[in-house]
Amino acid sequence: LSHRCQKLVPKGQVAVVEPADEHHYQPGYTLVGGGLYKLQQCKTPMKRVLHPDNVWIKQAAKKINPQENSIELM
């Protein structure tokens, strides 16, 4: 999703708030259960998943306020 958003706005205007170092491809977990994937195939370093022009805020969100277009971080 961050890749799609980045195409619509100038560089550095898309921020991703995510404390995790890895992205988990959750649909792949069903394939792990079926023996078609190994668990490690469902994990990718977050830096490889994000668009290079995104700003990665490596913290958790405490509160999201859409009316004020703001996020309170932990």
Image: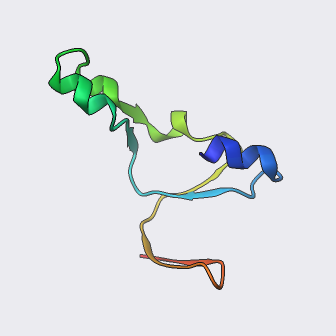
Q: Name, please, the residue furthest toward the top.
A: 36
Give the residue drawn at x 41%, y 76%.
74
For residue 65, side relative to residue 28 (left or right): right
Q: Is residue 67 left or right of residue 13?
A: left
Pick the residue in front: 39 or 73: 39
The location of residue 20, given as percent across then percent down, is 38, 51
Q: In this rendering, would 37 be left or right of 53?
A: left
Type of colouring: rainbow
The vertical placement of 65 against 22, above or below, is: below
Left or right? Give the position of 53 relative to 26.
right
Q: Residue at x 68, y 43 (%)?
A: 4
Quadrant showing the N terminus: top right
**Residue 28 drawn above or below residue 57:** above
The residue at 27%/26% (across/down) is 40
Which residue is situated farthest in the bottom direction here?
Answer: 68
Quadrant position of residue 36 = top left
Residue 53 in the image, given as x and y percentages of width and height: 71, 45
What is the x, y in percent for residue 52?
A: 67, 39
- In this rendering, is residue 18 above or below 50? below
Tally of marks: 0
**Please, which residue is most extreme toward the right here?**
10
Across and down, in percent, residue 49 comes to: 53, 36
**Residue at position x 38%, y 41% from top?**
22
